[in-house]
Image (spheres, rainbow, N blue to C red):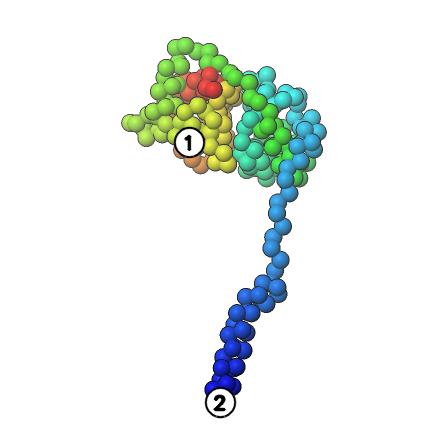
Amino acid sequence: MKLVSTSLMSYLLAAVLAVPLVSQAAGEAAPAKAAKPDLVRGEKSFAVCVACHAADGNSGTPVNPKLAQQHPEYLVKQLQEFKSGKRKNAVMQGFAAALSEDDMKNIAFWVSSQKSKPGFAKDKELVTLGERIYRGGIADRQVPACAGCHNPTGAGIPAQYPRLGGQHAEYTASQLTGFRDGVRGNSLQMSQVAAKLNDREIRAVADYIAGLR
């Protein structure tokens, strides 16, 4: 009788231990790894962007942003939101509408691999004010320091906050104004910050950012 009980217990224990193996075999297959971005395809696809953003992503036109060395996750997010209409821009919506998710990833990772060319602050009268806002915010209006999210050098934080250093002052100012005035509505955080800035402060911080490196 003892031998039978021992055999029965051994059988039950083996069955219990086998359950995870059976479940794993019968369950869903592990999700496939995401495909790596294709930089060769990305460079080819970027050809349609060259007219506005230059061949290496360093736009020479102040109203068009520099894209070189920008965080690729940020660029993908912006392209997705242009395509969906969450971020409004007739030209960019037209281009983004034709892109697949893979196209967006390939373009973003290729242009982010290009080295950004430095910019320069131009308005000496405003640069001190811009530096003060960027580094310390405006305490009495609860405006946080830009450096807290975008890094003291403007490098940003990958996958969270975009790189700003060296960006055209005109472009940065237009985006801050857009956030403040409700024209650009794809970042509640930035809309809340920009809502507390006047035109002079926006110009100042944008000019200071242009000289960051």
Tag in front: 1 or 2:
2
View extreme (left): residue = 140
Which badge, 1 or 2, is on the more N-terminal residue? Answer: 2
Seen from the viewer's position, the closer of residues 120 and 129 is 120
Seen from the viewer's position, the closer of residues 36 and 76 is 36
Q: Secondary structure at mark 2?
A: loop
Q: Number of numbered discs present? A: 2
Seen from the viewer's position, the closer of residues 70 and 6 is 6
State the image coordinates of residue 140 (x, y, percent, origin top left).
29, 27
Tag 1–tag 2 contact (CB < 8 Å): no
Name the residue at 51% across, 77% down: 10
Q: Quadrant of residue 113?
A: top right
Mark 1 and mark 2: Cα distance apart in space = 72 Å
Q: Secondary structure at mark 1?
A: helix
Name the residue at 60% across, 55% down: 30
Q: Looking at numbered disc 2 in the image, what kind of residue is underneath it? A: Met
Task: Tell whether 185 sits left or right of 45.
Answer: left
Label 1 belongs to which residue?
A: 149
- In the drawing, what numbered circle is on residue 208? none
Q: Residues within 10 Å of mark 2 (few under 14, many from 20)?
A: few
Name the residue at 54% across, 28% down: 70
Residue 196 visible in the picture: no
Compared with 110, 170 (above or below) is: above
State the image coordinates of residue 165 (x, y, percent, origin top left).
48, 22
Label 2 belongs to which residue?
A: 1
State the image coordinates of residue 189 (x, y, percent, origin top left).
42, 35
Name the residue at 50% across, 36% down: 159
Q: Looking at numbered disc 1 in the image, what kind of residue is underneath it? A: Cys
Residue 31 visible in the picture: yes
State the image coordinates of residue 25 (x, y, percent, origin top left).
61, 64
